[in-house]
Image (cartoon, rainbow, N blue to C red):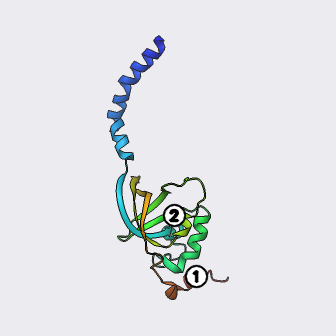
Amino acid sequence: MKILQVASLCLAVIAPAIGTFTGLSASSARAANAGEPIEIKGEIIDTWCYLSGVMGGPDAVVGTAHHTCALWCAAGGIPVGVRAEDGTVYMVLKVKGEDALAKTDTLMEIQSDVILAKGVHYVRDGVNYLVVENVVANDGITNKNHEDFGPVPGFAIPEKQ
């Protein structure tokens, strides 16, 4: 019993000192993890192709020109994102009511669509995350750039050696 009392006393004395040394306190750590309510309008995107540039620039990996690839990537486990109207990309962590670890059709059904969503926005290490609580509106695929790029953008087809 004495050992537990001494350990508790040491922890009570040391923990605030560690927080002061690192510049963090328990309350600031909790605040850093607290999300902010947000309403966001943007296109559901394939984050791998969008951020890596493997299939071309940002205008080539959205809408109808990239829809099939976006479906394959999402089905394969690539994180889905929302590219807001201002160009900010949010990684979608979860859609409310779904098991984040179970494969569901919701994100597949809205891939490449422009949506208006309410949710909770988190920022960690400069990355924007979004937990979607409600899809308020779905405008469908509004970025119809298939005519510009074809089913596969020409610059994404490897040249034969």
Give the mark toward the camera: 1 or 2: 2
Q: Which element is circle 2 on?
A: strand
Determine the residue positioned at 57% across, 79% down: 156
Q: Is residue 64 above or below residue 38?
A: below
State the image quarter where residue 138 is shown. Answer: bottom left
Q: Is residue 134 above or below residue 109?
A: above
Q: Position of residue 44 (x, y in %)?
A: 47, 69
Mark 1 is on which residue type?
Answer: Val
Q: Is residue 62 above or below residue 80?
A: below
Q: Are marks 1 and 2 in contact (CB under 8 Å)?
A: no
Q: Is residue 61 above or below residue 35?
A: below
In the picture of the structure, the residue carrying the numbered disc 2 is: 80
Q: Which mark is residue 152?
A: 1
Determine the residue positioned at 58% across, 70% down: 71
Q: Position of residue 121 (x, y in %)?
A: 39, 56
Mark 2 is on which residue type?
Answer: Val
Camera-side residue of 15 and 92: 92
Determine the residue positioned at 57% across, 63% down: 78
42 displayed left or right of 94: left
Q: CA distance from mark 1 to mark 2?
A: 20 Å
Crowd around label 2: few <14 · some 14–19 · many ≥20 (10 Å): many
Q: Which mark is residue 128?
A: none
Q: Earlier in the sequence, mark 1 or mark 2?
A: 2
Q: Position of residue 142 (x, y in %)?
A: 45, 79
Camera-side residue of 30 and 155: 30
